[in-house]
Amino acid sequence: MTMTRTTTPGTAPITTRVASDRLRPDVTDRDHSRGPVDAAVTLVEYGDYQCPYCRQAHPLVEMLQQRLGDAGSPFRFVFRNFPLIEIHSRALHAAEAAESVAAHGGEMAFWAMHNAIFEHQRDSAIALSDQNLAKYAVVAGVDETLVARDLKNGVHEPRVRDDFLGGVRSGVNGTPTFFINGVRFDGDWTDADVFARALEDAAAVASGR
Amino acid sequence: MVLPPGLPAPGFSLLASPDHLLSLAELRGRPVILAFYPADWSPECSDQMALYNEVLPEFERLGAQLLGLSVDGVWCHRAFAEDRRLRFPLLADFEPKGEVARRYGAYREGDGTAERALFVIDADGVIRWSYLSSVGVNPGANGILDALESIAAGDAPARLPPQEPAP
């Protein structure tokens, strides 16, 4: 944690509570997760499907999962929704579409959809239109009419908002925000080596080395 | 040092738009969040004001009014607020520059900007929580929500410790 505390010189801190940037909703079965569930390290990303930085993080996380897995310290990756809907007009529906695919097609389908959305994010100005989101769902193996109907009815909006609020309470301060074993990672995630080292350090701590 | 909890929040009147002066006293009776920040126009996905704009319904649910404050002028604030579609006032601590930030202990002399500092003020005008963040780190909204929930739960304000220990 890099934050400073409000203190009064010569006295104990009188700030009654200090923001703790720890993941508050623990990782559960409700989460979308990839990688071994018993891994020593769990990486949680709060992300927005329309955010350019999240698109940049997407292949990086995949690469790190591969790299650390090959090195014998695999980690579990969890993605939670943090759509910045005031600045990203399609982010909410993109998140709802991914949840819809998960509900109809299961976890494998969710990850296929997750990949498809990030891969297509910048195809065109309408890459994340409802119509295109429904098309990516087909690629993920889910009937597009189901996804279109869910989007129209906002079926998965409460889930997405829950994710968002959980993120706010955990100290998410932008997208993407990462938590490594529940602790917010404030290092430079764009540097693969820095990111990998943070994950390896967490693995070492978890195994008591 | 930013003003600690327990102190009365210093009053101020600042322009919220080219023709609207907003004073803290007008907001007495409900909690107020003051979010001092260094400058308009930081990158949007990690921008503190953009985040607060998204969390605004939660602040409102807890009855609070959010105010953003920086030393930027009213026209700069207007352009920034329009671009980011911000739905809360940005106050211009512009003339005398940074005077309100100074009163809250949230002015950076060397940089000539406000600190990234948060204050939650209760309905009686007492500071209930304050927080100084690193300038480069967006402090998020969780501390604000904790403070607002504590106020809503009827917790008593923190008592200031005595300045000098009793003999």
Image (spheres, coloured by chain):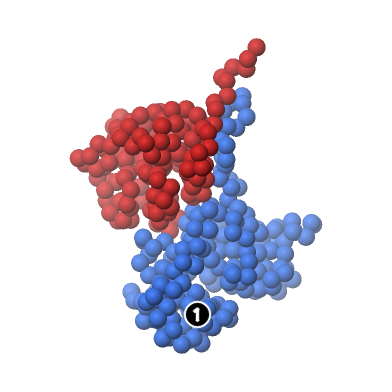
Image hue for chain A: blue
The number of discs equals 1
Name the residue at the top extreme: B167
B1, B4: nearer the viewer = B4
- Look at label 1 and name its amino acid: Val
Residue B45 lies, with reference to residue A58, above or below; the image says above
How far across and how far down the image is residue B5, in percent? 50, 32
Q: Secondary structure at mark 1?
A: helix
Q: Is residue A54 visible?
A: no
The image shows residue A35 at horizontal and vertical percentages of 66, 73
Taking the spot 40% from the left edge, 81% from the top edge, the residue there is: A149
- Taking the view exactly as shown, the residue that stands out farthest to the right is A209
Please identify the quarter of the rendering in which residue A189 is found.
bottom right
Q: Residues within 10 Å of mark 1 (few under 14, many from 20)?
A: many
Q: Which residue is at a point 59% across and 69% down the rendered structure image? A: A31
**Relative to residue B163, is residue A147 depicted above or below?**
below
Residue at point 50%, 29% (across, down): B6
Name the outermost residue toward the left.
B19
Q: Chain of mark 1?
A: A
Q: Which residue is mark 1?
A: A101
Q: Is residue A44 visible?
A: yes
Q: Quadrant of residue A94?
A: bottom left
Q: Colour of chain B?
A: red
Closer-to-camera residue (A119/B118): B118
x, y (%) of residue A209? 79, 57
Left or right? Give the position of A55 relative to A77: left
Expressed as whole percent of the image width and height from the top left, the position of residue B133 reads: 51, 42
